[in-house]
């Protein structure tokens, strides 16, 4: 068979369906929402497309900027923790015994086979006051007390008069934990891909030339895994920034993220233009992150070219 | 899908299928009432119908009912606002009935097609949010009040104070995640009318909610009853029906509408504009308002039915349950939320964003 590049007719036939798909289900709806972000409400269901910047101006109110800042903070913390954990996991998969590789990768991807809502409710069952973790701790507490009683120290109540369950849910920590749990696979997979492609002789050379393990990781492996790290950071950070289910279900009274505000604009506040503007501000940030990545990659290429 | 036989599609059944699709796509209002497909698309809340209600209706009329579920009125409204995707009967709450009437999203009901209307208690046959009941008929009604764990609270916590303005149950309180309801009921506690639109009063409610936040564990997304049942909280603000469902599982849980009065709500049967099967829809609404059917539904879901004929068929333990039918004095002090316009909706949402951001 001819290569598609040599046969333009085949190429265009193959290219039509995805292009139509992209246009009809991505670009057109997105443009509509974009146009809506410059509109204003006229009555309960009608929107006037007046091309005003009012919605964006309203989004610059310190009230919403604070919510944006908090969402960035949650997403950044999530990404950082994911990066740390993900790097360790990806390294153990890459450098562990090869027969473990596929099962381990499947374990990483397994949670994707379950709906996010189900996974989040499962987390609630694990972390709540009478949940699995606190149940386990209480059991330990009882055993500890039993042991103390046997050795005659029971009356001192060294472990407290009564088991105090940890408050693991409904606070900002629970939100970050939930976000890390949900987004970890997004980080592990690109890291694994780039670590797996890495030329191992570089690592051997580094070790042979007297660098320690830590030094090798910092000066050889991390720079070489950088494309995977950048990709992982972006595809973790972007969806984490737009999460609303996790803060809704696991968060406390001050865990509101910007996507919760956006969700309300499309539902109870019924202000679609403002919701569209807030969504697009998030989108601009995403574009900016991806553009940064493109700039970074082209700079790398140039650097490599000049060597 | 029922028609999943192993054989290939014959040309005739394919054409019939096309016809059905075309019929489903026809949204023009005032579609011919006669000669409808034997189908009905019902959009309802979860666990909000009797166990055999739909099956009985199909057995009686031959009309197949497809039921989709929504979790809140906002979801229902958002789904219908860009045009009816094919639903015949919906169950919006009173303030959304009002909104949808304002936005011409409901089809007027034809009283002659619903001979069971006289079963409805006379007090429910008219409504401020739908004068003359032109677009809606009552399905169930109830209150928002306080659910509590009896062994963990002092007596009966019959004031909003325990939820909104006290550290007595600090860290063991769940409020609701719905900003409008939260601000309206806080106004009620402050002694203002539920539907008060005065910005100064909204501000006062907002500030109280922010001040009291350290005592609140969570603004629950319609799962306050689960938090109460699992011991996560000892006291919460919830819809009475939700608390009733966990009261059935745990004797230690109680429900009270505070003495300041609460929020009265009414879920209504309506036909959305552009419904593909309006005749079937009328038939279905009439079926739900039947005394025996109404009694079966109320008995199963344990909400207060406005159907007087149905109540006569139900036992005293239902009819005199104060969690289902609060005392008359409490009802008198309670109010129904009415739609207050776009500006108010925006003011409330901003106030709620402030509460959540603080």
Image (spheres, rainbow, N blue to C red):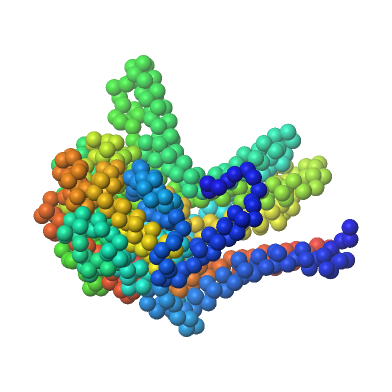
Which one is in front, B324 or B169?
B324
Residue B299 image point, x, y percent: 26, 43
Tell me which residue sits at (47%, 83%) in the image. A50
- Residue occupying the point 72% across, 41% down: A94
| In the image: residue A21, left or right of residue B24 | right
Number of numbered discs on residues = 0
Q: In this orientation, which residue lies closer to the viewer: A294 or A296?
A: A294
Who's the residue at 21% across and 39% down the image?
A: B150
Query: Is residue B84 shown to the viewer in this render?
Result: yes
Instruction: Indicate the position of residue B201 as horizontal and vertical percent values.
Output: 22, 69
Is any atom of residue B216 visible in this view? no
Q: Residue at x 28, y 47 (%)?
A: B293
Relative placement, left or right, of A296 versus A247 is right
Q: Which one is nearer the viewer's eye here, A230 or B21?
A: B21
Q: Is residue A138 above or below residue A148?
A: below
Where is the C terminus of chain B found, in terms of image quarters?
A: bottom left
Residue A106 vertical position relative to residue A245 in the rendered view, above or below: above
Q: Nearer the viewer, residue A197 or A109?
A: A109
The picture places residue B283, in percent across and down from the top left corner, at: 34, 57
């Amino acid at each position: 068979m001819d290569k598609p590049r040599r046969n333009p007719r085949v190429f265009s036939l193959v290219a039509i369906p995805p292009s139509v798909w992209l246009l009809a289900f991505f670009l057109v709806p997105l443009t509509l929402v974009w146009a809506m972000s410059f509109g204003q409400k006229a009555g309960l269901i009608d929107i006037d497309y007046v091309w005003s910047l009012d919605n964006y101006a309203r989004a610059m109110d310190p009230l919403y900027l604070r919510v944006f800042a908090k969402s960035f903070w949650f997403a950044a913390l999530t990404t950082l923790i994911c990066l740390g954990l993900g790097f360790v996991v990806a390294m153990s998969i890459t450098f562990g015994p090869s027969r473990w590789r596929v099962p381990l990768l499947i374990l990483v991807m397994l949670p994707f086979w379950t709906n996010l809502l189900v996974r989040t409710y499962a987390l609630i069952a694990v972390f709540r006051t009478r949940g699995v973790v606190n149940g386990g701790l209480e059991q330990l507490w009882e055993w500890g007390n039993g042991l103390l009683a046997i050795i005659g120290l029971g009356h001192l109540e060294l472990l407290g008069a009564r088991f105090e369950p940890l408050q693991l849910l409904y606070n900002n920590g629970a939100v970050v934990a939930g976000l890390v749990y949900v987004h970890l696979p997004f980080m592990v997979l690109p890291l694994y891909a780039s670590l797996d492609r890495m030329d191992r002789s570089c690592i051997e050379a580094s070790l042979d030339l007297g660098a320690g393990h830590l030094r090798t990781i910092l000066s050889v492996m991390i720079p070489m895994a950088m494309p995977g790290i950048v990709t992982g950071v972006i595809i973790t950070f972007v969806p984490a920034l737009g999460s609303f289910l996790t803060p809704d279900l696991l968060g406390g009274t001050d865990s509101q993220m910007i996507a919760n505000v956006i969700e309300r604009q499309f539902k109870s506040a019924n202000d679609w233009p403002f919701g569209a503007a807030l969504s697009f501000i998030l989108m601009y940030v995403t574009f900016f992150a991806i553009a940064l990545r493109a700039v970074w990659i082209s700079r790398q290429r140039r650097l490599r070219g000049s060597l | 899908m029922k028609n999943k036989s192993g054989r290939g599609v014959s040309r005739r059944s394919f054409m019939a299928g096309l016809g059905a699709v075309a019929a489903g796509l026809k949204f023009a209002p005032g579609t011919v009432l006669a000669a409808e497909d034997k189908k009905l698309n019902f959009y309802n809340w979860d666990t909000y119908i009797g166990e055999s209600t739909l099956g009985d209706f199909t057995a009686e009329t031959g009309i197949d009912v497809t039921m989709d579920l929504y979790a809140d009125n906002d979801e229902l409204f958002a789904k219908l606002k860009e045009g009816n995707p094919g639903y015949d009967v919906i169950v919006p709450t009173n303030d959304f009935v009002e909104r949808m009437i304002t936005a011409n999203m409901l089809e007027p009901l034809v009283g002659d097609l619903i001979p069971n209307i006289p079963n409805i208690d006379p007090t429910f046959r008219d409504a401020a949010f739908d004068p003359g009941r032109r677009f809606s008929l009552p399905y169930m009604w109830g209150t928002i009040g306080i659910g509590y764990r009896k062994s963990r609270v002092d007596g009966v916590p019959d004031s909003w104070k325990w939820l909104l303005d006290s550290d007595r149950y600090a860290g063991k309180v769940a409020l609701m995640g719905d900003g409008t309801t939260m601000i309206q009921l806080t106004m009620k506690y402050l002694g203002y009318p539920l539907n008060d639109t005065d910005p100064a009063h909204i501000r006062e409610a907002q500030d109280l909610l922010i001040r009291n936040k350290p005592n609140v564990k969570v603004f629950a997304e319609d799962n306050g009853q689960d938090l109460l049942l699992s011991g996560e909280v000892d006291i919460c603000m919830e819809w009475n029906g939700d608390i009733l469902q966990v009261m059935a599982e745990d004797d230690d849980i109680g429900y009270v509408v505070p003495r300041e009065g609460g929020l009265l709500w009414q879920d209504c049967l309506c036909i959305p504009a552009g419904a593909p099967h309006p005749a079937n829809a009328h038939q279905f609404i009439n079926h739900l308002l039947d005394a025996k059917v109404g009694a079966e539904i109320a008995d199963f879901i344990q909400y207060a039915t406005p159907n007087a004929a149905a109540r006569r068929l139900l036992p005293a333990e239902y009819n005199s349950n104060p969690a289902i039918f609060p005392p008359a004095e409490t009802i008198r002090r309670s109010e129904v939320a009415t739609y207050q316009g776009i500006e108010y909706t925006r003011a409330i949402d901003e106030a709620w964003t402030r509460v959540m951001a603080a």
